[in-house]
Amino acid sequence: MLANELVWVRGAGELGSGVAHLLHRVGLHVFMSDITPALAIRRPVTFSSALIEGSSEVEGIESKKAQSYKLNQSKRWKHIPMFEDDPGKLLELKPTVLIDARMIKKYAEDFRTWADLVIGLGPGFEVDKNCHRAIETMRGHNLGRIISEGVPLADTGIPGKLGGETRRRLVRATRSGQIKWSSQFGDLVTKGQQLALINNDKPVFAPIDGIVRGMISEYTPVVKGMKIGDIDPRGEAVEYQQISEKARTIAAGVFEAIVLHQNETLS
């Protein structure tokens, strides 16, 4: 039964959070892990903030920072436990499914012994080499498709096109240090408008007109040139507090892979 599966979603960014949200809603026991400080920028739709703030909510589902490396599967969980990413301790929980959603985009080590079913999201995974199944994360016709042989499409280094914009919509750190945002999620901004200060003296400006959809946590030290935010040129049409169509499609592919695996196991 699906309810007997213990699912570890490793990586609490936008895609991992979308996956965990769906799996929790359909009744699976799901726990997550991430690093601190978290690098997620679309924080209204990620659970990563739970590690710093104690809890985080996405579309009515709450994640809470776990107080110990213990889990009780005797009843349905009301929230998603969030752990520091310590593989040694987390493997002691004996997950039956591991979903690697860290989006490292480079060849990963072989995780196939970590769980009965290991699913890798996006580039860096090769079926029967370091995972059992992979999921395509590149926007396009095959987004969310289960890969049973071979690899997902390689990372192009170019962000997906939104409203005709790719690289220009990303906000990058103008220097290394600590960031303080003057903008809020959902703000409509114009190109050249100040969004933040780094170390209280180096301004960060909006690269294009649009809506503020991504801002890295102020708890996270930034490095010059790193991605720290995202402006969506589609403006008010964007539901920045809702899980994206990309994350939902990938989550559906993950759920399909879990169901297919269980059917194969029972047959």
Image: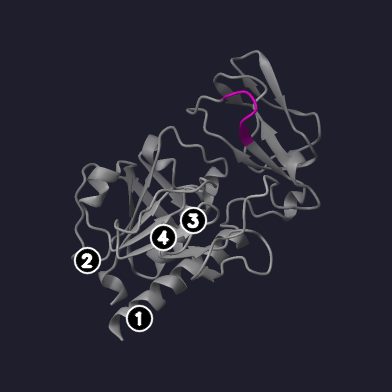
Q: What residue type is labelled 2?
A: Lys
Q: Do tag 3 and tag 4 residues touch (Cβ < 8 Å)?
A: yes
Q: Does the magenta stretch include residue 227?
A: yes
The circle drawn on residue 264 is 1
Q: Earlier in the sequence, mark 4 or mark 2?
A: 2
Which quadrant of the structure image shows residue 119?
bottom left
How far, Cα to Cα, is label 3 from label 4? 7 Å
Residue occupying the point 31% across, 86% down: 267
Residue 204: give x, y in percent of width and height.
70, 25
Q: Distance between the residues labelled 4 and 1?
A: 17 Å
Q: Circle 2 sits on which residue?
A: 75
For residue 45: magenta? no
| Mark-to-mark CA distance, 3 and 2 | 33 Å
For image coordinates 51% across by 45% down, the residue present is 104
Which mark is drawn over residue 131? 4
Between the residue at mark 2 and the residue at mark 1, the CA separation in whole angstroms equals 26 Å
Across the whole image, how many numbered discs are drawn on residues? 4
- Circle 3 sits on which residue? 125
